Image: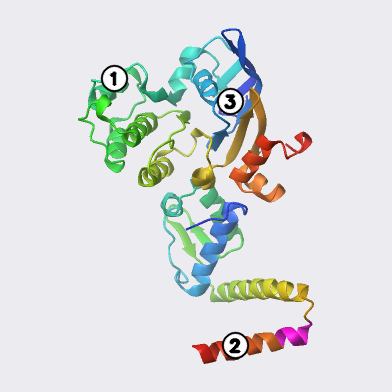
Amino acid sequence: MSQYALELTDVRYRKNQRTILDHVNLQIAPGKTVGLLGENGAGKTTLMRLIASVAKGARGTIAVNQQTRDVQRRALVSFSEGLQGFRSTQKLREIRDFYVRTYPDFSAKKYLDLVTFLQIDDDQRLATLSKGTREKFIIALTLARQAAVYLLDEPFSGIDSMSRRRIISSIIQWKQPEAVLIISDHYVTEIAALLDEVVILKDRTICTHKRSDQIRQEFNLGIEAFYESVYEGSIPDDEL
Amino acid sequence: MQFDDKVPIYYQIENYLYHQIVAGTLQPGAKLPAVRQLAVDLTVNVNTVQRALTEMIRQEILESRRGRGNFVTQDTARITALKHRLITDYIQELYTQLHALRMDDAEIVAAVQHYLQTRGNQA
């Protein structure tokens, strides 16, 4: 039996006759917080959609706690992709109710703790939310489930530093010890201290996957500097 | 706390706590905050804090009591030894820098003494 919470084996994905992801192999142990880095269009969101079984039709296998089938995986992965599918006139409470009905592992208590901590008024309508509140609401919904794998897609883009700090604190406080958390971004300095591991997507595949401490010790680089070096091609492939 | 992103974070947390212990901010026998609380305070992940604490327990600077948390050792000899280790580290660093300027031992001692005297005048 695999000791990994998340295991991707030779995953390939094409859409509209274009290769989006190719030969993606990835193994993540339970409990790890992982930064998924890559430029816009590198395939970060697609990879998350595939892991969460929102996007289908990939070749290869994706296993979450050894479960490879879509239905089982959906039950184990918490991913609230940009609140897609909800009407802008819906109140946040109604979206919460949908989550309660849809996901048996959704904890109303955890949700309440999170919206309180993140200072979200869930009597508002979706359309009235600022970018920051929207991201915070997504975090609350995502983390309120008791999942094996949590996926956060660029949770910090375009939000102020106070909200950012609150989001980071909520992640540290509410992630269960055994759960895997994957955070995608293309700007890492503020979350660098959170990451156990770093995965870099480039040219439709994972070009490197390293422990944060390994990056600091072996390359004598910060995470951001390492990421930039990888993209500039200034680190030889055989060292990655 | 601001971290240097080029140095392993667990190592920086260890050093941060060693300083607090040597400076007496954390007294012998004091209970440390819970791991999760430390992680929130330092804005790092729980695994990283745990790794730093595990190393400190291995070095017997901290004592882990099952179900009760982590405590600073009551053994003051250990804390004194830790203090000497920190002092040696700092002096080593200073010495390496000055030695690189081609100063010999006598010049380094003289420079340190001169610094202490003039600093006293300025204060």
- Residue type highlighted by circle 3: Ala
Direction from residue A238 to residue B82 in the image, left or right: left
Magenta extent: B104-109
Label 2 belongs to which residue?
Answer: B116
Residue B74 placement (x, y as % from top left)? 50, 71
Name the quadrant containing residue A237.
top right
Q: Is residue A60 visible?
A: no
Q: Nearer the viewer, mark 2 or mark 1?
A: 2
The amino acid sitting under disc 2 is Leu
Q: Comparing marks 3 and 1, which lies closer to the viewer?
A: 3
The residue that label 1 is drawn on is A98
The question of residue B51 being in magenta is answered with no
Disc 1 crowd, CA 10 A, few/some/many (<14, 14-19, 20+): few
Kindly identify which residue carries mark 3: A42
Residue occupying the far front of the picture? A232
Identify the element where label 1 is drawn: helix
Establish if B75 lies above or below B52.
Answer: below
Residue visible at 39% across and 33% down? A143
| Tag 1: amino acid | Phe
Mark 2 residue element:
helix
* Residue A5 visible in the picture: yes
Question: What secondary structure prevails in the magenta region?
Answer: helix
Above/below status of B9 relative to A143: below
